[in-house]
């Protein structure tokens, strides 16, 4: 990712895209972004700011202990507990996206894996795991660490009875994949007798869906369509 300024603009857009989908209207959910300079620190939206009204000056930079090192105000504490262990465990990622959605949360209550039943679902083939844990209200770094452990090297995780979570090399990737995973959860709920395609065919589709620049392009479409 380039400059902090560009990154914060993109983070604003991420929150605004969430709002455009009707997500986070109760202040639930969070998108984080690792700071490009202070790489052990990450940004979260100040608590109380409506997602649709997020501005670059509304973000707070937190260090590994959860102390505010730039910006001011409180953050969603669960946000810190979830995002800190993930970003610490995965130096290859710079952003995490999570919120409670119309389809993702009901799907998570079915406590089952994502299968390659639609084109988009192939993006998550062999890259999405289930966090089979009853801590639906993450109240400590220990809870976040268990999520990080479950996620492993994958790009997405279904938090059972809770919701979806995606990670990315930047905000464009974590957010566009989150929107995609919500669409996949919707298909799983609606297509009750869905028959998955073969692993071989799913891998082939995944190769194209995850080609260089695909996430960036999807994010730009989201920005153009919703903002
Ligand atoms: Zn949550």
Image (cartoon, helix red, strand yellow):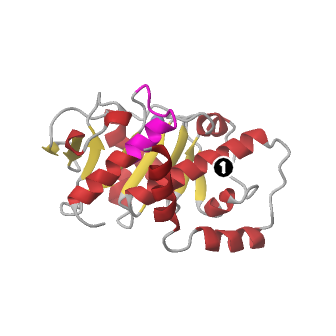
Q: Residue at the spot x=46%, y=51% of the render? A: 224
Quarter residue 82 falls in: top left
Quarter residue 156 falls in: bottom right
The reply to whether residue 175 is visible in this rendering is yes
Q: Please state the extent of the stretch shown in magenta in the rendering.
A: 14-26
Where is the C terminus found, in terms of image quarters?
A: top left
| Front-lying residue, 102 or 149 | 102
Give the image location of residue 144, x and y in percent.
40, 45
Q: Residue at the spot x=16%, y=42% of the render? A: 68
Give the image location of residue 30, x and y in percent.
39, 41
Q: Residue at the spot x=60%, y=45% of the render? A: 182
| Front-lying residue, 50 or 71 | 50
Q: Which residue is mark 1?
A: 184
Crowding near the residue tagged with mark 1, few <14, some 14–19, many ≥20 C-alpha atoms within 10 Å:
many
Report the side of 197 relative to 156 (left or right): right
Instruction: Tell me if the residue at label 1 has its CB under 8 Å from ligand 1.
Output: no
Numbered disc 1: secondary structure: helix
Report the side of 159 relative to 40 (left or right): right
Q: What count of labels does the image hold?
A: 1
Give the image location of residue 220, x and y in percent.
45, 58
Q: Residue at the spot x=35%, y=39% of the render? A: 79
Q: Looking at the image, is 37 positioned above or below residue 24?
A: below
| Front-lying residue, 46 or 62 | 46
């Amino acid at each position: 990712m380039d400059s902090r300024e560009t990154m914060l603009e993109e983070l604003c857009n991420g929150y605004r895209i969430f709002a455009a989908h009707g997500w986070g209207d109760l202040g639930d959910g969070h998108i984080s972004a690792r700071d490009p300079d202070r790489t052990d620190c990450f940004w979260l939206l100040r608590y109380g700011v409506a997602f649709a009204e997020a501005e670059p000056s509304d973000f707070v930079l937190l260090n590994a202990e959860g102390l505010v090192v730039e910006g001011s105000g409180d953050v969603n504490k669960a946000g810190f507990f979830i995002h800190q262990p993930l970003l610490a465990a995965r130096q290859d990622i710079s952003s995490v996206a999570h919120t409670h959605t119309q389809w993702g949360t009901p799907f998570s209550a079915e406590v089952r894996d994502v299968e390659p039943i639609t084109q988009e679902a192939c993006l998550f083939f062999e890259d999405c795991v289930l966090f089979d844990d009853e801590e639906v209200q993450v109240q400590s770094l220990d809870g976040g660490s268990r999520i990080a452990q479950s996620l492993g090297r994958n790009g997405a995780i279904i938090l059972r009875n809770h919701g979806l979570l995606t990670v990315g090399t930047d905000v464009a990737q974590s957010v566009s994949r989150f929107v995609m995973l919500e669409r996949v959860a919707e298909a799983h709920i609606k297509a009750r007798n869905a028959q998955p395609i073969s692993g071989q065919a799913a891998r082939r589709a995944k190769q194209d869906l995850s080609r260089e620049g695909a996430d960036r392009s999807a994010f730009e479409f989201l920005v153009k369509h919703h903002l």
